[in-house]
């Protein structure tokens, strides 16, 4: 009796779970399927897309490579072996520090107390800005690579994300009493669910003395505009990860700009905007350093402006 080539039903994962576990939106999954021929979903009894485990693993690796700057069109058609080789080559550019190795050991052994101690000590040692741009940014890469190579389970990546989020939220709370202009409303548009990136930006704004209003991820554009007015925001800051498609990102920024008064600035950043052309009335920030300099320019401009 021949064996079926299909994955057993229990090994298939629904599109919502794939979106959650890989960070790739449903819209992007469908676009890649149509444009590049991958992923190749099956259909469940309700006609919904479901994906085999090996495809989800490959999608996770693709997301990490896109985060590192690779173009989806150049890598999505590649095989798993080719992607793994490319990821290994990309990772070889930096030497893994003993500090990161120790943290990865606590994560793999599920030592929550050890992770909390590591992150707390790193925050105290480096200060908030360097902790975000150095420690957290570096750990994001290391954890992403480990997950893509099959060295971490999904629950372990989620455990990591939760510890980072807890540490950043506590640091933001401790620094928020220093809040002063500008008032910054932070969120992301529907389809962009990466919370760590938003928290990193909020921590940097807070560390620089700004007053932040965080709405969390995936806020409808119309509600972002309403929230900005309700909270008297000076700036709306949006984050777009590498898996977000340039076209929808650009359209979201255009729509928001049309809804907001000219006095409210829009700043947008993240890997998802690397291929986005300029949007009138929107400041596109390419890195954390540019965010810091743009904030200083905003303060200088408004300090010199005459009082109304």
Image (cartoon, helix red, strand yellow):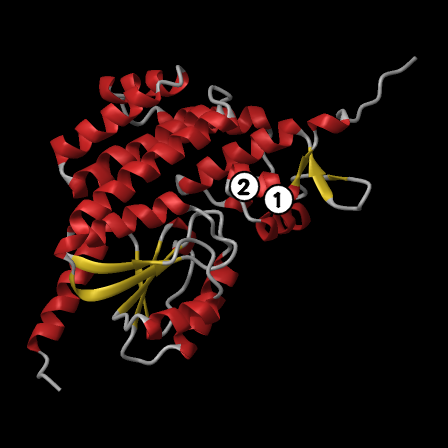
Please say if 100 is above or below 173: above
Question: Dividing the picture into quarters, in which one does residue 187 lie?
Answer: bottom left
- SS label for mark 1: helix
Question: Dividing the picture into quarters, in which one does residue 179 lie?
Answer: bottom left
Q: Can residue 281 be seen in this snapshot?
A: no
How many numbered circles does the render carry? Answer: 2
Please say if 128 is above or below 6: below
Please state, as top left, top right, bottom left or bottom right, where the N terminus lies in the image: top right
- Hey, which residue is sitting farthest top in the picture? 1
- SS label for mark 2: helix
Q: Position of residue 111 (x, y in %)?
A: 35, 18
Q: Can residue 186 be seen in this snapshot?
A: yes
Q: Position of residue 181 (x, y in %)?
A: 16, 66
Question: In the depicted view, which residue is nearer to us: 298 or 232?
Answer: 232
Please say if 294 is above or below 200: below
Question: Dividing the picture into quarters, in which one does residue 297 lie?
Answer: bottom left
Query: Which residue, given by chain and number where applicable, does mark 1 sit on?
Result: 16
Q: CA distance from mark 1 to mark 2?
A: 6 Å
- Crowd class of label 1 (few under 14; some 14 to 19; many from 20; radius 10 Å): few
Q: Which mark is residue 20?
A: 2
Please state, as top left, top right, bottom left or bottom right, where the C terminus lies in the image: bottom left
């Amino acid at each position: 009796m021949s064996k079926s080539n299909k994955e057993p039903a229990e090994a298939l994962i629904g599109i919502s779970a794939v979106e959650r576990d890989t960070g790739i939106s449903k819209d992007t999954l469908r676009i890649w399927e149509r444009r590049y021929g991958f992923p190749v979903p099956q259909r469940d009894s309700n006609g919904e897309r479901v994906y085999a485990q090996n495809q989800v693993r490959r999608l996770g690796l693709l997301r990490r490579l896109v985060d590192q700057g690779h173009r989806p069109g150049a890598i999505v058609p590649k095989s798993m072996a080719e992607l793994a080789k490319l990821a290994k080559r990309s990772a070889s550019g930096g030497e893994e520090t003993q500090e990161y190795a120790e943290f990865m050991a606590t994560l793999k052994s599920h030592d929550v107390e050890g992770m909390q101690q590591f992150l707390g000590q790193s925050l105290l040692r480096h200060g908030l800005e360097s902790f975000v741009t150095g420690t957290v940014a570096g750990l994001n890469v290391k954890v992403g690579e480990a997950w893509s190579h099959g060295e971490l389970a999904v629950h372990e990546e989620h455990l990591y994300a939760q510890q980072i989020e807890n540490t950043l939220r506590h640091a933001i709370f401790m620094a928020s009493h220093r809040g002063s202009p500008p008032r910054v409303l932070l969120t992301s548009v529907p389809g962009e669910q990466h919370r760590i990136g938003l928290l990193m930006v909020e921590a940097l704004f807070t560390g620089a003395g700004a007053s932040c209003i965080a709405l969390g991820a995936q806020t409808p554009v119309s509600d972002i505009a309403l929230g900005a007015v309700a909270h008297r925001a000076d700036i709306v800051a949006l984050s777009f990860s590498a898996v977000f498609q340039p076209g929808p990102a650009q359209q979201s920024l255009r729509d928001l700009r049309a809804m907001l008064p000219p006095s409210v600035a829009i700043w947008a950043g993240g890997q998802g905007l690397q291929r986005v052309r300029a949007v009138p009335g929107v400041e596109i920030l390419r890195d954390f350093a540019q965010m810091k300099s743009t904030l200083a320019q905003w303060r200088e401009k408004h300090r010199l402006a005459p009082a109304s």
